[in-house]
Image (cartoon, helix red, strand yellow):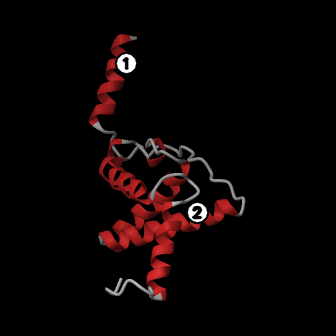
Amino acid sequence: MNGNPWPPELSDVIVMLSDKLVDSNAFGIPFDDMLHDFKKYLANRRNYRSAEMYPFRHPVQYWIFTELRDKVYDLRLTEPEVEKRLAKMIRQWADRVAKGEPIPRPVLRVEDKTRPSPAWMEMLERKKQRSA
């Protein structure tokens, strides 16, 4: 806001309404939680063999987070840019759902054998083999 609370400028009204629309998305996950989940995904993604194995709260998070992660690294986005893109992507997916389009479930792709698995996964597999 510009300091004068009434009457609000059109740009202020648009910003307030767009924030409300993002917060009340079709997926039932508030924007702040989505942002927190995305940051958590960035921090923990390397612990899983593929993005499809990551425990997302909602299938739409897979599609949003994987695309946004690529953009973060390719374009070196700042945190405010990440927030803007995340809000835009949530709106795009909400529009798709509103039109009746289903959200595809993440499907496990062929495993990338060139990338070593995390040490904890190897340790877990060895433990299973010993106990069997």
Q: Residue at x 27, y 35 (%)?
A: 119
Q: Nearer the viewer, residue 96 or 75?
A: 96
**Disc 1 secondary structure class:** helix
Mark 2 vs mark 1, foreground winner is 2
Q: Nearer the viewer, residue 63 or 83?
A: 83
Q: Looking at the picture, which amino acid does disc 1 mark?
A: Lys
Using the rendered view, name the quadrant where residue 72 is placed.
bottom left
Using the rendered view, name the quadrant where residue 113 is placed.
top left
Q: Quadrant of the image for the C terminus?
A: top left
Q: Residue at x 56, y 47 (%)?
A: 106
Q: Nearer the viewer, residue 49 or 83?
A: 83
From this view, report whether residue 8 is shown above or below residue 32: below
Q: Residue at x 44, y 60 (%)?
A: 31
Residue under label 2, please give it. 93
Task: Estimate how packed mark 2 is, as few (under 14), some (14 to 19) or many (20 or more) residues with alpha carbons within 10 Å.
Answer: many
Residue farthest top in this picture: 132
Residue farthest front in this picture: 6
Q: Give percent across and percent down for residue 20.
A: 49, 67
Q: Earlier in the sequence, mark 2 or mark 1?
A: 2
**Disc 2 secondary structure class:** helix
Q: Is residue 110 visible?
A: yes
Asked if labels 1 and 2 touch by Cβ distance under 8 angstroms, the answer is no
Q: Give percent across and percent down for residue 12.
A: 43, 82
Task: Estimate how packed mark 1 is, as few (under 14), some (14 to 19) or many (20 or more) residues with alpha carbons within 10 Å.
Answer: few
From this view, report whether residue 64 is shown above or below residue 122: below
Q: Give percent across and percent down for residue 129.
A: 37, 17
Q: Residue at x 39, y 58 (%)?
A: 32
Residue under label 1, please give it. 128
